[in-house]
Each structure stands twice: as structure tokens, then as C-alpha cells.
Image (cartoon, rainbow, N blue to C red):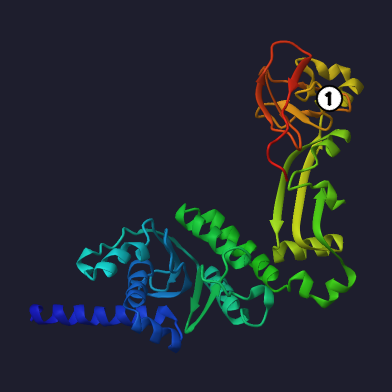
Amino acid sequence: MKKIVLPIILLALSAITTMAQDKLMRISAEDREIRNQEPKLAFHDKEITRLLIPENAEFGMIVVPSFYSERALAYDSVSHMLVTSYVKKSIWNEMTKPFKQNDMSLYKAPDVRKRAVSLNYIQTRKLKTLWNHVISTSEDRLDNKLDGTSWTFFLGDQQAKARHSNNPMVRFVEEICSAVSDSDTYRLEFLIDFALDKTIERMDRLPALDDPVLSQRCRVVDTLVVWNGEVLPSKLYRQGKPPTEYFYQRQQIIVGGNHSYRNALMQRDYAEDYSIIARDHIYEIITVPDTLCEAYLQQHPDKKKNLRRIEGFVKDEKGKAVAHAWANISGWCGGAPTDEQGHFVFWTPLKDNRLDVYCDGYSPALKYEFDTVPVTIRIKPSPYKF
């Protein structure tokens, strides 16, 4: 009797697995026909489902296909767990050689790393609502249009594909993947309970250029430069370089920044904050008061204690002064520009005696060692013309 029952159970499990796989692939009739004609695609579909997606997955997303690694994030309705699966060697890569040699005995399924975190009913419902929102709005809203091939979201009999770079849902899912992989339940709770609503809110907004209300009241520019919340002339950001000399003159030093290129979400946020739509680039610069510049320390001489004064001149090969060069201790963000006489001066808490000098049109002088000050550094014209 046991010999009869066991094969029946195995057959039943096999049938259930096949149904689950078929249910999760979510491909159109036209796509299915192409995959049936292309054995490699059909095999990949089955393998990625078998290896990455739990049998009882109700909703989630997969990365397919990939030449590097593949992963999935899916909710298992039986275990009530959010499961992330990751393969370091991609399924797609591992099966390429066997198919080329027409010998599937060469195929070796890659190892899969799985992590899982349990969800309560409310969290599950919220996540499922988000997945549904992504799929149902992808065709109607330009900002939600998921038209790439990096990610595939699935729920029920529907699917949507997402570009990796712009869509906020993709970034949100990556955060969830990371939290599950680290078994960080506190972070996961924060993401689902708070960040999820913000993600949906960001997805519901049209890109700034396509919004009739914003485009009427906003000025459109190619490049937007924002410094500590203040809009600066875009010409200050030359060739992708922050205007260090501009800030030095204002006793400020750059400590951080961000660059976005044609990012619809950033476009929208900055348009709402500053009434300016950036068509291409958005540069955000963060500075703090430069308490090591000469002007500041002349005003606060008591702060010179434990500091060194670095002074010098920058000249070209013919001995001519080079203005607007930037000198700083190697590997340190502080420094100073040269004036019309090629003179620079700044203060530092470091004991390092190596200087870096940069100037447009000249080759940089890197890690120039000196023993005494003032130091004279000679730089050569750059052989590269921009």
C-alpha cells in the first residue's frame, strides 16, 4: 500500500508545483508562444520559478533574465513569510553552455540563498495593496509606467515590468530585500508601516514636465544647482565640477552632494520646492562653514591653536603665476584657491606634508612633498584639450 501511495503523492506534488510555476510566470499568449519556440527561454522560466519562487507564492517580483545574478522576493501564503531568494551565478548564464552544446546533462543548477521574515496580517495586506497598485497603474500613469526588463512584478494573473533606475517601487523593493536578507525586522516594519505610503504617494505623481499645473508656474532650465536649499546660477557647475572657489570666498567648504540626471522623481520634488523644472541635470551641494580658511581664522585668532598654516605659490613651467588653481592636503577636503599672484594659504590640523594642486587646463600635481613653507609648486599645461 505504501508503495502505491508514495508515487501518487509525488505525482500530486509535481502537478501542484507545475501549476504554481505556470501561474507565476504571468506571460502573455504571444510571449508564451515565443518561449515555446525557444527552448532556452522556456527552460529558464521553469528554473527561475523552481529555484527562486516559493511554491505558495501569492505576489512578489523577480529579476529576469540576468547575466550576473538573479533574485526574487515573494510572499509565501502558507508560511506567512516574506521570502527573498538570491543566486550568485545566474541561472541564465549557467544554462547557456549546455544549450550551445545541446547537452543538458552539463547543466548544474546554481546554489540558492534564501532568507525569510514573517509578516502579520496587516503588513501582508499593505504590501499586497502596493503590488496591486504598481500593476494596475502602470499603463495609466506616466510616472508609474513599468516598461523596462530589469524587474517583473506579479500578482494574480497580472504582471508589470519596471526600469531599474527611475521607479520608486523598485528602490522600495530593494530596501525590503535588504531588510529580509539581514533579518532586520525593525527596519522591515518601518518600511511597510511608514515608507510604503510615501512610495505610493511618489508613484502617483506625474513627471514635472508632463504636469500642466507645474509646467505653467515653473521655469524650465537645463541644469539646476541647489546649495543648502538656495538656487545658484547653473554656470557655476563647470564640466561637472563643484564651484569650490565660489564657496571658499563665502567661507564655506563642500561636505556632500548629489547629482541626478533626468530623474523624474527628483524633477518633481525640486519643481515643487523651487518652482524650477530641471530638464537634464540636478546638482545638490551641501556645505558647512570653513573654519580653517585664512579669512575665518583672522577673525577668530583663538582657534589657531593646534593648527598649521600652509602657504605657497602655484606657477607654470615658465614661472608665471597660475590663478584659480585649488591646493589642498592630499586626501583632505579642505584647501584654498590661488589668487592672481598664484598665492594660496589655508590652515590644517593634519601633519601630512603632501599637497595636491588642480587647475583647469593643467595636469594636476598630486602628492607634492614639501619641507618648509611657503612652498612653490610648478604645474604643466594639460596635453588634453576640452
Foreground residue, 26 or 279?
279
- Residue 215 visible in the snapshot: yes
> Which residue occupies the extreme right position in the image?
299
Q: Is residue 184 above or below residue 72?
A: above
Q: How many marks?
A: 1
Foreground residue, 294 or 193?
294
How busy is the neighbourhood of tag 1: few (under 14 within 10 Å), some, or many (20 plus)? Answer: some
At numbered mark 1, what does the secondary structure look like: helix, strand or loop? Answer: loop
Residue tagged 1? 321
Residue 351 sits in quarter: top right
- Residue 230 visible in the snapshot: no
User: Which quadrant would the N terminus be assigned to in this image?
Assistant: bottom left
| Residue in the image at 48% along x and 65% along y | 119
| Left or right of residue 358: residue 63 | left
Question: Residue 85 at x, y = what percent?
Answer: 40, 62
Foreground residue, 101 or 151?
101
| Residue in the image at 46% along x and 86% along y | 28
| Left or right of residue 72: residue 274 | right
Question: Residue 50 at x, y = what percent?
Answer: 33, 71
| Residue in the image at 76% along x and 56% along y | 282
Question: Residue 179 at x, y = what percent?
Answer: 51, 56
| Residue in the image at 80% along x and 25% along y | 292
Question: Residue 375 at x, y = what percent?
Answer: 76, 16
- The amino acid at mark 1 is Ala
> Which residue occupies the extreme bottom position in the image?
29
